Image (cartoon, rainbow, N blue to C red):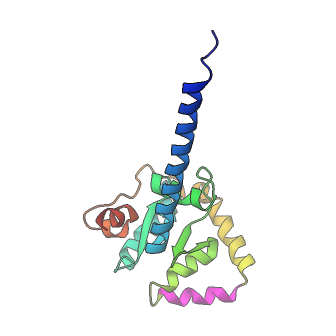
């Protein structure tokens, strides 16, 4: 049997397509608003060293200036898609500061400079040419699972640390 053609199904298909486009545009606008409103760090939630980094930030970013979001979460994936980055092969921490995207070694240095002393001393890392910094960053990032392992115990928001997570900040606003 041939599927019905014409009128109703063509209109239904067009209606779905147009509404899907509108929803995608709304989501992109929401992500744009979030990026402008918050300083964000996307991290790999299954990576041991990345989880350690997130715990370090929770300990040392007392005012919770940076908001953490897992790259594997729906919000993290939406941010990655917004920047046309892979949602399957996550290879760099992303830092969005004052609406500006930073990746690789610059992302790390950008965060450290805002944590105050002694961490801001890492600003001296900017003296190393970026291509060298990024080469070293990539060596660790691309081998992080082999070097440090993966975890089933992802870092989750708790009563004590929820102010550090982007999802919580959005819900509270």
Residue sitting farthest toward the left: 159
Report the residue at 45% width, 90% height from top. Answer: 117
Q: In this view, does 112 lie to the left or right of 63?
A: right
Give percent across and percent down for residue 138: 67, 66
Residue 4: x and y in percent read 59, 17
* Residue 80 in sight in this render: yes
Residue drawn at 59 percent across, 59 percent down: 144
View extreme (top): residue: 1
Against 107, residue 51 (above or below) is: above
94 over 115 or under it: above or below:
above
Residue 121 belongs to the span the image colors magenta: yes
Q: Is residue 82 magenta?
A: no
Q: In the displayed image of the protein, which residue is found farthest to the front?
A: 7
Point out the image quarter for the C terminus.
bottom left
Please say whether residue 38 is visible from this viewpoint. no
- 116 over 3 or under it: above or below: below
Which quadrant does the N terminus fall into? top right
Residue shown at 34%/80% (left/top)?
A: 63
The residues colored magenta run: 119-128
Q: Is the magenta stretch mostly helix, strand or loop?
A: helix
Q: Is 150 rendered above or below residue 57?
A: above
- Give coordinates of residue 16: x percent, y percent: 53, 38
Residue under the image location 51 percent in, 44 percent down: 19
């Amino acid at each position: 049997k041939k599927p019905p053609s014409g009128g109703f199904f063509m209109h239904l298909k067009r209606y779905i397509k147009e509404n899907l486009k509108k929803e995608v545009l709304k989501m992109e606008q929401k992500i744009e608003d979030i990026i402008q409103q918050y300083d964000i760090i996307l991290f790999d939630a299954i990576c041991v060293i990345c989880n350690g980094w997130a715990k370090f930030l929770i300990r040392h970013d007392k005012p919770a200036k940076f908001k953490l979001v897992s790259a594997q979460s729906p919000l993290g994936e939406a941010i990655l898609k917004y920047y046309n980055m892979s949602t399957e092969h996550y290879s760099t921490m992303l830092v969005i500061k004052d609406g500006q995207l930073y990746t690789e070694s610059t992302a790390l240095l950008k965060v450290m400079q805002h944590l105050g002393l002694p961490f801001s001393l890492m600003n001296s890392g900017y003296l190393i040419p970026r291509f060298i910094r990024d080469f070293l960053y990539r060596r660790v990032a691309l081998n992080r699972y082999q070097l440090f392992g993966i975890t089933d115990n992802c870092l989750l928001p708790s009563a004590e640390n929820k102010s550090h997570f982007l999802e919580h900040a959005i819900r509270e606003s």
